[in-house]
Image (spheres, helix red, strand yellow):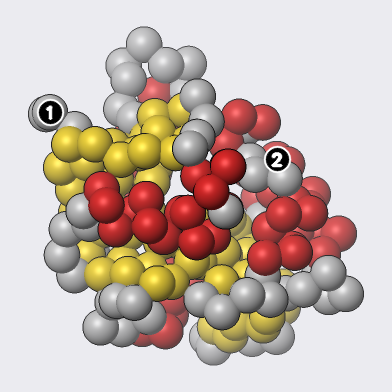
Amino acid sequence: MKISLKRVNIFSEDVERIKKLYCTAFPDDERAPMFMLLRRSGRKGVDFWSLYADGEWFGFAYAITEDDLTYLFYLAVSEEKRGRGLGSKALSVLKMKYYGNRFFLALEQLDETAENYPERLKRRQFYINNGLAPLDRTIKEGNVIYDVMGTGGNVGPHEYIRMMKNYLGFPFSRIVSMNNSGK
């Protein structure tokens, strides 16, 4: 099976199905405005990818890179394509695409009282099975606090803040932070 990445911009044929998947795969408080994602996708270091397996669309990924640091901001596989190993294959292709970089992502904290705790546990295990390890960090974006997982080395709070300041601009970068998790 050949996994390929196709760049997404505001004129891409996949935008409508990406929007639909985005709204079903991520809760409201975890979604950045789609117009912002699309608008910034043309910037240096910002990659919005449509994911294909043997020419058939199955999801999207969004990554922000600065220096040797890549933040996988979003990764989603369409519901009807889940459970076929496509997420693992896509993640493998993305890690190769950004080979040599410290590669990290944020995911919902493991909270046993959360309604979707089994889903959170499964998601965390997916990333562990695909070579990512928990980092001793948390990220706060808006009102949501995430655990951080990655590969290739740790990420310093100052690096994350600089990356987000460059991506979001100064006023909006004040709604994000990174701290030691204290776990």
Please state which amino acid type lies under the numbered disc 1: Gly
Circle 2: element type: helix
User: Looking at the rendering, which quadrant does residue 96 occupy?
Assistant: bottom left
Residue 145 x, y percent position in the rendering: 39, 29
Q: Nearer the viewer, residue 70 or 66?
A: 66
**Disc number placed over residue 17 in the picture, else none:** none
Indicate left or right for 122 with 21 as reference.
left
- Give the residue at mark 1: 182
Decide: is 159 above or below 99: above
- Give the residue at mark 2: 24
Near mark 1 (Cα within 10 A), the count class, few <14, some 14-19 or many ≥20, is: few
Which residue is painted at 79% across and 49% down in the image? Answer: 20
Residue 19 visible to the viewer: yes
Residue 129 x, y percent position in the rendering: 26, 58
Which residue is painted at 56% across and 79% down in the image? Answer: 44
1 vs 2, front mark: 1
Please state which amino acid type lies under the numbered disc 2: Thr
Near mark 2 (Cα within 10 A), the count class, few <14, some 14-19 or many ≥20, is: few
User: Looking at the rendering, which quadrant does residue 53 occupy?
Assistant: bottom right
Residue 170 x, y percent position in the rendering: 53, 48
Residue 80 visible to the viewer: no
Circle 1: element type: loop
Residue 12 x, y percent position in the rendering: 83, 75
Real-space Cα separation, disc 1 to disc 2, in angstroms: 32 Å
User: Looking at the rendering, which quadrant does residue 101 occupy?
Assistant: bottom left
Which residue is painted at 25% across and 48% down in the image? Answer: 157
